[in-house]
Image: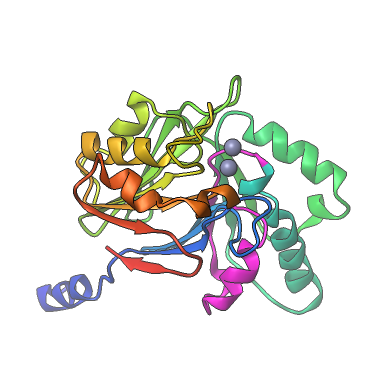
Amino acid sequence: MPKGILDLNLNLIRPMRVTILGSGTNIHPTRAASGYLVRTDHTILLDFGPRTLANLMKTGVNRHRITHILFSHYHADHFSDFITYFFDAMIFTKYQGGTRPPLTVIGPRGTKKFFQALFTTLPGFTHAPFVVHFKEVADRAFMIGNTKVIPRTVTHTQNLHCLGYRIEYGGKALAYSGDSQYCDSLVRLCGDVDLAVLDCSFPASRPSPVHLHAGQCGQVAREAGVGRLVLSHLYPITERYNVREQAGEAFGGKIVVARDLLTIKL
Ligand SMILES: [Zn+2]
Ligand SMILES: [Zn+2]
């Protein structure tokens, strides 16, 4: 390829963009549950909780172009819209003349068993007319095109393998905690990222044993040296507290309280 064309292509690389599809939890009056749209050279979803599919439609992104869905774990608030999404994709490709690229579903240990049980139980799911791959990952980096994905085991609830994800593209890095307690692994996942989206389920004064609280989000951001901190996965009770202020006691950088459909460019 002549050098001029290569230069032109490099200039056309668009920055990574993250759109918050859901910043709440299972039941929340104004926020969808966990879900994030990440646009790099691929269109990727991180988690797919209830009501996030409706928000995905509002972004204008063609849902049939999504090639990879990365799950942190399978608590319903991170997963349940996948069922609706997949059923729709089957109707689209089977009866509406639609085509779509292969879909790769990636998640923690147990992913294959989980989807095997689900697909053999839900009518029609084993007969999708498009290719579906299931991939279990642990603490090893892999590539999706030019996008580097680094999964990392974090501590959430007992006996459940939960992953956070670090995504690197175009010289920028994003970290997503999934659901996590404070742990060294999470700090390492977030090391020097430009943007960290953390599980801020509860305020510092109402902590939970299995989630971070706002003060711990600030602590992780400071220890990891993150650029910008996004507080997300807010439970309804958390709305009554100033989580930005609580996180700001530990972290002096920029803090954003997540809201659905907010897009951040990296
Ligand atoms: Zn969870
Ligand atoms: Zn959760």
Residue 164 in picture, x, y percent from top left: 44, 38
Q: Residue at x 51, y 53 (%)?
A: 240
In this picture, is 200 found above or below 223?
below
Residue 141 in picture, x, y percent from top left: 36, 37
Which color mode does the image show? rainbow
* Left or right: 209 in relation to 170: right
For the C terminus, give its image quadrant: bottom left
* Left or right: 14 in relation to 57: left
Inspect the magenta stretch and tell me whether residue 65 lies in it: yes
Residue 232 in picture, x, y percent from top left: 46, 52
One can see residue 198 in this view: yes
In this picture, is 100 found above or below 243?
below
Q: Residue at x 60, y 25 (%)?
A: 160
One can see residue 167 in this view: no
- Give, as a single range, the part of the protein colored magenta: 48-75
Query: Farthest residue toward the left?
Result: 3
Front residue of 239/123: it is: 239
Q: Count how many numbered circles sit on residues in the image.
A: 0
In this picture, is 174 found above or below 156?
below
In this picture, is 151 found above or below 172?
above
Q: Residue at x 32, y 44 (%)?
A: 247
Front residue of 210/105: it is: 210
